[in-house]
Image (cartoon, rainbow, N blue to C red):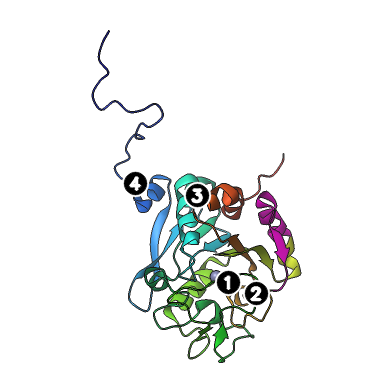
Amino acid sequence: MHAAPEHAAAPGSQTPTGLRSIHVADLARRNGWRREQVGESANGIPIEAWWPTTSRPTRVVWAAIHGEESVTLQAAQHLLRVVHADDACAVVVPVLNPDGVLAGTRQNARGVDLNRNFPSQTWSDAPSPTFWSTSITRTTERRTQLSSPGTHPGSEPETQAIMALVERVAPELVVDLHTPLECVIAMSDRSQAFAEHLAEPAGLRIVRELEGPTPGDSASWCEAAGATAVTYEFELAPMPAIWSRHSEALVRAIVERRRSR
Ligand SMILES: [Zn+2]
């Protein structure tokens, strides 16, 4: 009988060849994704986009435009770890509002709700309510009920960064990840089919409108810019529950449907 070798790995736990860390950036790069800084937050933190292999990506997907919804960034980062860049058609921005993520706030460092700051026709200079009366209560220490929409449409560096990226990629589809409304929001007829495709695996309902107006939201601006925009909202839950329920939809968001021959 021989002794088990020291430091023997448990079955199935071997470190994959060449993997030196479990940093998201390393894992994504190992999957072929290329990182590029596409902007900077109000506090000077880089906003990074991850590019797939294809020279003509057709989609842009972003997460954590609301900093308190950091589960969306965890899900987006995990997506880069599990989908190879060769298979993807989307540019992914896992953290659009880094200042808000670090502060645990919905808004950016200047108190602006970035998803009310886009220069769509609906932009309004009135402070924007975070929510209307709803069945979901979200109260945290740093939460305010009213957010600034910015001094003028597109005033914030984070908004400008994602607008420039969308204009550069000219995507057919954009997906904006949020939580916790547990639905897929399709604001237009043309977004319905893609919303159904995304909503199906997790059994999410598709809604056309929220309970109140969302002036200056990204989807309106993207649709005016020619992209079909879908907002995907997780339920209020942490990882890994979010991943188990939504991974198929998230993969669908960045991988094109396989065409039958
Ligand atoms: Zn949100």
Crowd around label 1: few <14 · some 14–19 · many ≥20 (10 Å): few
Q: Which residue is mark 1?
A: 137
| Gap in angstroms between the C-alphas marked 4 and 1 | 35 Å
Q: Amino acid at mark 4?
A: Ile
Q: Are marks 2 and 1 in contact (CB under 8 Å)?
A: yes
Instruction: Residue at 39%, 62% (x, y): give it.
Output: 36
Q: Which residue is mark 2?
A: 134
Q: Amino acid at mark 1?
A: Thr
Which one is in front in this view, the residue at disc 3 or the one at disc 1? 1
Q: Are marks 4 and 3 in contact (CB under 8 Å)?
A: no
Q: Of label 2 and label 4, which has the lower sequence position?
A: 4
Q: Of label 4 and label 1, which has the lower sequence position?
A: 4
The segment highlighted magenta reads 193-209
* Residue at the extreme top: 1
Decide if ligand 1 comes within 8 Å of the CB at mark 2: no
| Gap in angstroms between the C-alphas marked 4 and 3 | 17 Å
| Gap in angstroms between the C-alphas marked 2 and 3 | 26 Å
Instruction: Residue at 59%, 60% (x, y): give it.
Output: 235
Q: Which residue is mark 3?
A: 240
> Residue 4: percent from the left, percent from the top?
27, 18
Which one is in front in this view, the residue at disc 4 or the one at disc 3? 3
| Gap in angstroms between the C-alphas marked 3 and 1 | 22 Å
Residue 158: say if magenta. no
Q: Amino acid at mark 2?
A: Thr
Crowd around label 4: few <14 · some 14–19 · many ≥20 (10 Å): few
Q: Which residue is mark 4?
A: 22
Q: Of label 3 and label 1, which has the lower sequence position?
A: 1
The quarter in which the C terminus is drawn is top right
Answer with the quadrant where ligand 1 appears in the image: bottom right
Secondary structure, mark 4, is: loop
Secondary structure, mark 3, is: loop
86 above or below 162? above
